[in-house]
């Protein structure tokens, strides 16, 4: 570009600055609203803005990249410097704000555009941009979405997709654009306005029709389906129209504020994200309401005014230019000095970035040392923290024993490979029984088992399922008839057919599905042949409890809401987005369904709803679900069995009032995950069976139960649902699960429990099912250990036999504060079901802790006290909170016992030697060798004290240590000292009881 051309651009700066000012305003607003994508009106604003604002910026950037200065290496180096500095700062900033992980090759938030701009300018510097290159860039931009490995790493995806817009701006003739700007007539403005309004109409219509447009579509990520290809083409087209509209309508005279913001667009772009992230923190999406839009507009204006000011622009440019000057130009002494300082700062920053991910551990260690110096007892995080889960009471067990049980599984769905893999050459049929083999027990044991039959059985001639999802093929589901038989044989009694694949094979396929279900004797609800079928209410009866069942779907793929409301009103029942123009109409229809049930001559006891709704592949509910769940509950629903998200979601309870003014509990199962699906990405292999328990006397919901499952497929078999309890307890099944798969099983257990129950449960806490009451999760009692003849001969066993009440006293190993509340003695005491057990134990406790709690301990007046304490006295070495030597330790123990005897003179005592700790114990304040020596001294002093007082002394440590020599301690311990909730506490109970 010649100097005259550059001057020509400078003359027109106000025009282009106006454009850049408008675009940067939209960028800032979009980022203030981004957290609310998919929520209310904010979601529509975001979709509209993201259709064109960054393509337009790419276009403008291309135009300004004509000059030799823009293509120079100095210009590129400037962008690199800005990216390295501010992306690194953002990496640290985001880590502290949102605890995000460190990624060195993936740009954070909006900094991807700097990478793209660097790449584009390097390309035009070394590649001649011809019309052929432009056409190729468009083709690549559209079809690159089929490559799932083209991601945001180095911003490659958006760099490729937006490159055509950059090329258009770069190829734009400077003379022609100047002539157009100067010669625009009223008719041109009129055409521009018409084009703008038309584009806005097209955009809004598109957004309205495809309300579920995903973030990945807007961020130009890889395709999940063929529909995404259409989305990209439409978005590129809308972007082109909007750019043209802006190009025509933007005035050449400076627009107040916008022109100034345009001159500072780079500064605003780089700095504004630090502010928007704070806004997201202050106004989280979980509390979204429409007022947030007003807040976002106001925050955007303030941000633009501040960051667009001359002082910020001057300081920013000065800093960047100074860095470039120091490294590329003058080699003066001052520059050498500054360069050395900058290098040192960079090294420090790099080291900081490498160390920060471990900062929590470092902080914890600092707190540990500080705690010991400040006389704090609670120095070991692993001793003092953690969830202690309540144990189910005998009353709760009794009511569950007699309850009516509804088992619910999620989407019964067969993708292409699942259908093909089920074909048997020997029988000539498709066989699906194996996918239900291990879940069948739970489904048949339930009084009522319900599933969601997501897809038609339209017959072989219609063609079976066409895709495996996310493989670039259009997805139309259709199953062999034998799948219905397998579902029936699995124990499932009722299926909902209301789902978005209802019409994958047309209305004929839908009707044929109902015929096959009837033929196999499988109850169904959700789709209907005619008005009469739809108007009849399905009521299921079990143990005197009558339950009405309603089913709804958010729609069916490829069909509009109008189709179900006007063209075919009897086929199914739909629900819609809260923002839909049909929302109030549909809500009225739903409420009418409930009213019809309540007005029946013999109304049912309960109403269950099976809604097919929710965002896919997320463990959180969305506004759509929350809105309709609230409507259902307030209308009278007692049980909501949701699906469609293809991921486990929370179980919730809601207290409502019935027609008699009495309180009742409603349970909301948002989604149990799929049943067994070959698409296991996005935690698709983490599934469950959910059980709902109903009191047959009161006809009320009691609680829910969760059976976590892992979706697995043998190399020569079909995908199947495996209850995790079976994986850990079925020896045959264990031989079919690899060690690698067990890592994933552990992850699945954590995912299902933390999402659905609200507590993270590890494999050592495995149970056949997990109960959740309105008050929260309760665990089942530990099973009794096997008592051998050898054990019955020990003094300890005899003491337990003659003691009606037993009090266990100690630290975190007794408290169970790190394994969910599982005390070391539970397997042992489960063998003495008639004994009353008390527990007085605290994380990080020492003997001085017990003296502080002496009244609490002594008040039980138990027949037998089992005291296990002393390890922390040795580990923490704080003279104000610990016994510093063996004599002080025994003195503290004796003081405790004297107090107990004053309350219960005939009490008996069992004293356990201080527990061992592994060599990797990070909280021991002395060397491992000295620690172990002191533990031995404390144990020996305790043995002599017991011998003198005629108390029972137990030292299980040698036997436990011997076991650790034969087997990995990680099998029994969750860390350096605490036994896990299964084999760990069993080992400790066994070695305590067998000590002689």
Image: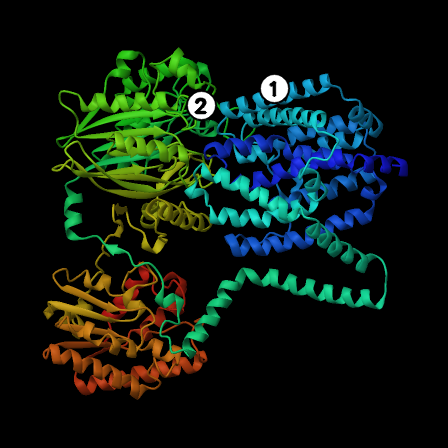
Pick the front one: 484 or 684: 684
Pointer 2 local density, CA inside 10 Å: few below 14, some 14–19, many at least 20: many
Quadrant housing residue 911: bottom left
Which residue is at 64% across, 18% downward?
A: 194
Q: Which residue is mark 2?
A: 477
Numbered disc in front, either 2 or 1 = 1
User: Residue 186 has which mark?
Assistant: none
Which residue is at 70% across, 38% downward?
A: 259
Kindly state the secondary structure of the residue where label 1 is placed: helix
Residue 951 seen from this side: no
As displayed, is residue 983 above or below residue 136?
Answer: below
Pointer 1 local density, CA inside 10 Å: few below 14, some 14–19, many at least 20: some
Report x, y in % for residue 198. 61, 19
As displayed, is residue 911 above or below residue 301?
Answer: below
Report x, y in % for residue 777. 28, 50
User: Residue 198 has which mark?
Assistant: 1
Q: Quadrant of the C terminus?
A: bottom left
């Amino acid at each position: 570009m010649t100097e005259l051309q550059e001057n020509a651009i400078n003359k027109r700066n106000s025009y282009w600055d106006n454009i850049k000012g408008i675009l940067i305003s939209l960028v800032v607003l979009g980022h203030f609203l981004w957290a609310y994508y998919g929520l209310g009106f904010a979601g529509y604003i975001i979709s509209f803005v993201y259709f064109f604002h960054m393509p337009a910026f790419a276009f403008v950037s291309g135009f300004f990249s004509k000059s030799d200065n823009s293509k120079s290496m100095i210009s590129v180096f400037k962008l690199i410097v800005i990216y390295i500095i501010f992306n690194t700062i953002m990496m640290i900033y985001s880590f502290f704000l949102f605890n995000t992980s460190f990624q060195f090759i993936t740009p954070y938030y909006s900094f991807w555009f700097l990478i793209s701009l660097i790449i584009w300018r390097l390309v035009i510097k070394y590649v001649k941009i011809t019309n052929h290159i432009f056409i190729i860039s468009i083709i690549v931009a559209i079809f690159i979405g089929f490559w799932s490995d083209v991601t945001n790493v180095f911003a490659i995806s958006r760099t490729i997709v937006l490159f055509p817009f950059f090329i258009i701006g770069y190829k734009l003739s400077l003379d022609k654009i100047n002539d157009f700007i100067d010669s625009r007539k009223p008719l041109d403005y009129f055409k521009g306005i018409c084009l703008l309004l038309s584009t806005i109409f097209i955009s809004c219509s598109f957004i309205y029709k495809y309300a579920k447009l995903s973030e990945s579509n807007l961020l130009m990520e890889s395709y999940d389906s063929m529909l995404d290809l259409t989305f990209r083409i439409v978005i590129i087209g809308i972007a082109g129209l909007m750019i043209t509209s802006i190009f025509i309508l933007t005035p050449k005279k400076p627009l107040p504020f916008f022109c100034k913001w345009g001159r500072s667009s780079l500064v605003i772009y780089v700095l504004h994200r630090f502010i928007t992230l704070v806004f997201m923190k202050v106004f989280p999406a979980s509390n979204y309401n429409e007022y947030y839009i007003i807040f976002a507009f106001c925050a955007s204006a303030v941000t633009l005014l501040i960051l667009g000011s001359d002082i910020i622009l001057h300081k920013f440019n000065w800093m960047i230019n100074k860095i470039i000057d120091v490294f590329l130009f003058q080699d003066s002494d001052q520059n050498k000095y500054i360069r050395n300082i900058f290098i040192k700062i960079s090294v420090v920053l790099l080291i900081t970035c490498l160390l920060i991910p471990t900062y929590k551990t470092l902080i914890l260690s600092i707190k540990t040392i500080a705690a010991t110096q400040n006389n704090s007892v609670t120095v070991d995080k692993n001793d003092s923290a953690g969830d202690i889960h309540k144990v189910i009471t005998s009353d709760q067990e009794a009511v569950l024993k007699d309850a009516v049980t509804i088992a619910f599984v999620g989407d019964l769905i067969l993708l292409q490979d699942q259908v093909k893999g089920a074909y048997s050459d020997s029988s000539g049929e498709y066989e699906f029984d194996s996918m239900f083999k291990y879940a069948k027990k739970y489904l048949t044991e339930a009084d009522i088992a319900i599933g969601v039959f997501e897809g038609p059985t339209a017959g072989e001639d219609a063609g079976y399922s066409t895709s495996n999802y996310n493989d670039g093929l259009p997805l139309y589901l259709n199953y062999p008839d034998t799948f219905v038989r397998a579902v029936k044989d699995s124990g499932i009694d009722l299926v909902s057919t209301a789902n978005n694949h209802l019409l994958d094979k047309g209305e004929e396929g839908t009707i044929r599905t109902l015929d096959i279900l009837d033929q196999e004797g499988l109850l169904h609800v959700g789709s209907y042949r005619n008005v009469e079928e739809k108007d009849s209410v399905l009521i299921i009866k079990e143990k005197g409890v009558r339950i009405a069942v309603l089913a709804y779907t958010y729609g069916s793929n490829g069909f509009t809401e109008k189709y179900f409301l006007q063209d075919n009103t009897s086929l199914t029942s739909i629900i819609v987005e809260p923002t839909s123009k049909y929302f109030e109409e549909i809500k009225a229809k739903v409420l009418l369904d409930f009213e019809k049930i309540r007005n029946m001559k013999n109304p049912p006891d309960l109403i269950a709803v099976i809604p097919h709704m929710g965002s896919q592949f997320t463990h959180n509910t969305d506004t759509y679900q929350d809105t309709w769940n609230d409507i259902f509950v307030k209308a009278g629903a007692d049980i909501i069995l949701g699906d469609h998200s293809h991921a486990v979601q929370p179980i919730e309870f809601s207290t409502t009032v019935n027609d008699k003014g009495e309180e009742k509990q409603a349970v909301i199962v948002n989604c149990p995950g799929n049943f067994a699906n070959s698409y296991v990405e996005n935690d698709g292999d983490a599934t469950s069976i959910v059980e709902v328990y109903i009191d047959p006397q009161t006809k009320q919901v009691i609680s829910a139960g969760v059976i976590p499952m892992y979706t697995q497929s043998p190399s020569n078999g079909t995908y199947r649902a495996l209850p995790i309890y079976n994986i850990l307890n079925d020896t045959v099944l264990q031989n079919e699960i690899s060690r690698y798969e067990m890592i994933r099983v552990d992850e699945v257990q954590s995912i299902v429990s933390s999402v659905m129950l609200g507590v993270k449960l590890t494999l050592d806490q495995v149970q056949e099912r997990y109960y959740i009451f309105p008050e929260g999760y309760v665990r089942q009692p530990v099973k009794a250990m096997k008592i051998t003849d050898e054990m019955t001969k020990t003094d300890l066993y005899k003491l337990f036999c003659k003691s009606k009440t037993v009090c266990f006293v100690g630290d975190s190993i007794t408290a169970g504060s790190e394994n969910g509340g599982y005390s070391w003695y539970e397997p042992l005491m489960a063998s003495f079901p008639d004994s009353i057990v008390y527990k007085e134990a605290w994380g990080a406790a020492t003997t001085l802790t017990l003296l502080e709690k002496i009244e609490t301990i002594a008040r039980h007046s138990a027949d037998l006290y089992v005291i296990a304490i002393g390890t922390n006295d040795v580990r923490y070495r704080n003279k104000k909170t610990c016994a510093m030597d063996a004599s002080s330790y025994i003195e503290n123990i004796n003081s405790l016992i004297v107090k107990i005897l004053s309350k219960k003179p005939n009490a008996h005592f069992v004293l356990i030697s201080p527990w061992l700790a592994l060599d990797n114990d990070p909280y021991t304040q002395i060397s491992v060798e000295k620690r172990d020596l002191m533990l031995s001294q404390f144990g020996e002093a305790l043995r002599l004290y017991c011998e003198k007082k005629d108390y029972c002394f137990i030292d299980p440590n040698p036997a436990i240590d011997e076991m650790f020599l034969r087997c990995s301690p990680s099998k029994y311990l969750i860390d350096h000292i605490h036994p896990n909730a299964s084999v760990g506490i069993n080992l400790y109970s066994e070695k305590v009881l067998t000590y002689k």
